[in-house]
Amino acid sequence: MVTRFPIWPLRTAGSIQYRQGALGVPGKPETGDQFGAALGGGGIVIGAPGEDVGRIVDAGSVTWKLEETVVQDGELVPGIAERGDRFGASVASAVVSRPDEEDGEMVFFNVLAVGAPGEDVRGAKDAGSVTVGWDFEVNDDGDSPWPGIVQSTRSAGEKAETGDRFGTSVSLAPDGSRLVVGAPSEDVGGADNAGVVQVWSLSLSCGYEYICYGGLGRGATFVQGRAGVPGHARSGTLFGASVAERPGGGGSFVAGAPGRRVGAAPAGGSLIVINPAGHSQELNQGSPGVPGTSEKGDRFGTLPRA
């Protein structure tokens, strides 16, 4: 179930609860659906990674604008709904505007990203994938606007491997120009489940009759201990278990490492603020200005999926 609260100021009076099969929301509540496990755009996209598609257990789905259920291998969506894909385990949304090339009028639409960390990729079980798309209203030419992205997509030296769980976390820049994806179970060297974060640039343009097209720039990979990223790639760190844009960050983003050992505290957790163009920073409980003390199992750096 998803509860939407009025804000400014935040209050409980007037809140609305949404569930499958009520208030016009498609679907049916079933055991283990996990409707609301991930949210994007204030509820414009809602993940249900435990949704069974037909008899396919935990294939996963997302609810779009509280009106439509989207699954893999659905209309304009690539991939095949398979057992354990958990499509919708992570979601992100951004509102984008572009001038129409024909008349110059502004076109407004939503870009979204959906993670399926249990997706098998060319025999690699649970390698994971991410689907990127935008409003159906501006894509009526029959071509798929939903490119499937895996670790090796436009990324030199990267490959989809068993158990990486790429797509566990996703985020989009507010203007839809960048996609950030976490693969927390990626092994780095001899460090199991050290985790990596990958970043792609997205380009969007709209042409005649409001048909919009997207481009995907080459991906960059971020690993702790390399290229100025604080910390070390160590077993169980789970770097990339959560990712998010840094508000007003001028191109920087944040990545959680909830399994990171902090001092004597296993899985005390940390949060990495990554600035691709300059100084990056690692924060944990006890860092200057951060309250609390790192303790065993705190898992600081686990960000809300919203």
Image: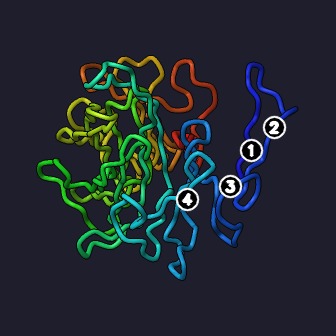
Q: Do the residues labelled 3 and 4 touch (CB within 8 Å)?
A: no
Q: Mark 4 points at which residue?
A: 69
Camera-nearest label, 4 or 1: 4
* Neighbourhood count class around disc 3 (C-alpha, 10 Å): few under 14, some 14–19, many 20 upward: some
Residue 258 point in image, percent of width and height? 49, 46
- Along the viewing direction, whichever of 14 and 74 lies nearer the viewer: 74
Q: In which quarter of the image is the C terminus?
A: top right
* Residue on which the image places disc 3: 25
Q: Which of marks 4 and 1 is nearer the N terminus?
A: 1
List x then y, in percent, for residue 52: 56, 73
Compared to 271, does 139 lie above or below?
below
- Of residues 290 and 279, the one nearer the viewer is 279
Q: Can residue 275 be seen in this view?
A: yes
Q: How far apart are marks 2 and 4 (CA)?
A: 23 Å
Color style of the picture: rainbow
Mark toward the start of the polypeptide (1 vs 3): 1
Q: In the rendered structure, which amino acid carries the disc numbered 3?
A: Val
Q: Can residue 261 be seen in this view?
A: no
State which mark lies toward you, 3 or 2.
Answer: 3
Amino acid at the residue labelled 2: Ser
Q: What residue type is labelled 1?
A: Thr
Foreground mark, 1 or 3? Answer: 3
Q: Where is residue 105 in the image (x, y as percent from the top left)?
A: 37, 20
Chain-order first, disc 3 or disc 2: 2
Amino acid of disc 4 = Thr
Spatial distance from mark 4 to mark 1, Cα to Cα? 19 Å
Furthest residue in direction right, as rendered? 13
Marks 2 and 1 close (CB-CB < 8 Å) = yes
Cα–Cα span, label 3 and label 4: 9 Å
Measured as percent of width and height from the top left, residue 269 is found at: 50, 42
> What residue is rendered at 56% in x and 18% in y?
289
Q: Mark 2 points at which residue?
A: 15
